[in-house]
Amino acid sequence: MNLGLLFDEDFVADDRVVLRGRRRQHLETVLKVSEGDQVPVGKVNGLMGVGTVLRLDDRDAELSVRLDTQPPNPLPLTLVLAMPRPKMFRRVIQTCAALGVKDIWLINAYKVEKSFWQTPWLQDEQLRENLALGLEQACDTQMPDVHIRKLFKPFVEDELPGLIKGRRGLIAHPGTPDACPTHLSEPATLCIGPEGGFIPYEVDKIIAAGAEAVHLGSRILRVETAVPVLVSRLYDGCLY
Amino acid sequence: MNLGLLFDEDFVADDRVVLRGRRRQHLETVLKVSEGDQVPVGKVNGLMGVGTVLRLDDRDAELSVRLDTQPPNPLPLTLVLAMPRPKMFRRVIQTCAALGVKDIWLINAYKVEKSFWQTPWLQDEQLRENLALGLEQACDTQMPDVHIRKLFKPFVEDELPGLIKGRRGLIAHPGTPDACPTHLSEPATLCIGPEGGFIPYEVDKIIAAGAEAVHLGSRILRVETAVPVLVSRLYDGCLY
C-alpha cells in the first residue's frame, strides 16, 4: 500500500476519514505510524494527497486529509481478456489496475473452463478490493471498470466492434506473421486469449470485429506476464 | 508446460528419454497423451524438437526424441535483483526464465529482510525446478545462471563494475529525472531494488559502479510486474 485509497464511506467530514480493517492495520503494523505522521492517500476516482494521522487505536485510524494532486494518466487501453484461471485471476486484476488499465472485459472462450466463472473473486466486493490493491500499489485512484461477459458470440458480434471502432484493435495470437506494434499514440483495444490460446473460430470472429492479429515473439507467456509485456510494448513501459 | 525440458539424467539412449514425477504426470493428466502422440521437448542448454510417446505407465513416460531446432535467442540482459520476498520469489524466478533472462544476480540490500534468505526456494534443486518451469512455459532450453550474493558492499564494489563494463548499466530508481531507455540494441545490466527501493547509499554505490539511474514513470510496480515491464521496454517486448 504505497497510497491509502479512500472511499466515500470513509469520510466523516470533508477533510477527515476513519479507516478500519486492512488499511488501519497496515498503518499500524507495516507503516508503524504515530499521531502526526503523514501518509500518501487518494480518494477513489479523485485527487491524491496527504493524510495526517489524528488518532490510531485498536479499531480506528482517523486522518485529516489534504487532496490536491491529479492521479497518473490512465492508459488509453481497453483490455479484453479471456477469463483467467482463478489461481491467476487476482494477480492479473491487481496487475491491470497497477498498470493503469481502466477498462477490462472478462470474456468467455472455448478454453476457459466453466469452473473459472465460479470464483468468488468475481464478486463485486472482492473485485473492488483487488482493484484497490493494484491502485494502492501503483499510487493511482481511478478505479477500473470490469465487465463480465460469459457468452463469447454475443460479445464478439454485438459489443466488440464498438470497442474497437476508432481505435487500434489487436489480438495477441502466437504464430501470426505481424509483430505487436510499439509506441502507440492512439487508444487501443487488445484481446488476450486463455491458456492454450483462442481457437481459430474465435480468432476469426475477433478479426471480423476489427482486430488485427499480432504476435509477441516465440516465447509463450502466462497471462500475468503477457499483460505487463504487452502494455509496456504498446505504451512505452507505462511512461505516459 | 509448453515444452518438456529434458535433462541429461532423463536420457536412456541418445534419442530416448524416460520421464518420471511431474513431467510424466503432466503428460498423462494435462496433455492426456497416448502412445504415438507427439509433444514438444527440448534438451536443457541444447536443441528443441519433438518427443514421440513410446510408453506411458504409472511410473514412466518413455519418449523417442528428435532434436533439431535452436531455442529462442537469449536476452542480452544481466539482471541484478535485490532478493525478493519468498512469497514472490518463485514467480519472479519463473518470470525471468520465461522472458529469456540468462544471468540473474540476487543481492542483499538494506530493505531485504534477513529472513528472505532462508527460503527453501534458494536451494539448488528448487531453483533449478522453478527455472525449468519458466523455460517450459516459454519454450526455451537455455538454463539461466543464478548467483547469490548475501553481502551488498563486496558485490557492488568488486563484482558489479565488471558486470556493467562494456554494457549499458541501469538502476531502476523512482523519482529520478531520466526515463528508462527503449529499443536497446546493446547488452545491458539492470539493477532492481527491493520493496521500498534501494536506500540512497546503495543507489550511490550502484551509480559509482557505472550504472545510470532511470525511472519508469510515476507508478510503483511490484518486482514481479516491474521485471516484464522493464524487459519489454528495453528490448521491445522480447521480440528479439
Image (cartoon, coloured by chain):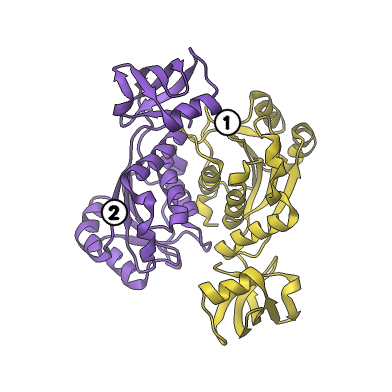
Chain colours: A yellow, B purple
**Label 2 sits on residue:** B148
Chain label for disc 2: B
> Label 2: how many residues lie within 10 Å, few (<14), some (14-19) or many (20+)?
some
| Circle 1: element type | loop
Compute the Cα span from label 1 to label 2. 35 Å
Q: Which amino acid does label 1 sit on?
A: Gly
| Circle 2: element type | strand
Q: Where does the image place residue A46, in percent across and percent down from the top left? A: 69, 69
Q: Which of the 4 image quadrants contains residue A27? A: bottom right
The residue depicted at 52 percent of the width and 57 percent of the height is A239
Q: Which mark is residue A24?
A: none
The residue depicted at 39 percent of the width and 33 percent of the height is B140
Of residues B217 and A17, which is closer to you in this image? A17
Vertical placement of residue B69 versus A173, above or below: above
Do the dots labelled 1 and 2 sit on one chain? no
**Label 1 sits on residue:** A196
Q: In this view, does B93 lie to the left or right of A187?
A: left
Q: What residue type is labelled 2?
A: Ile
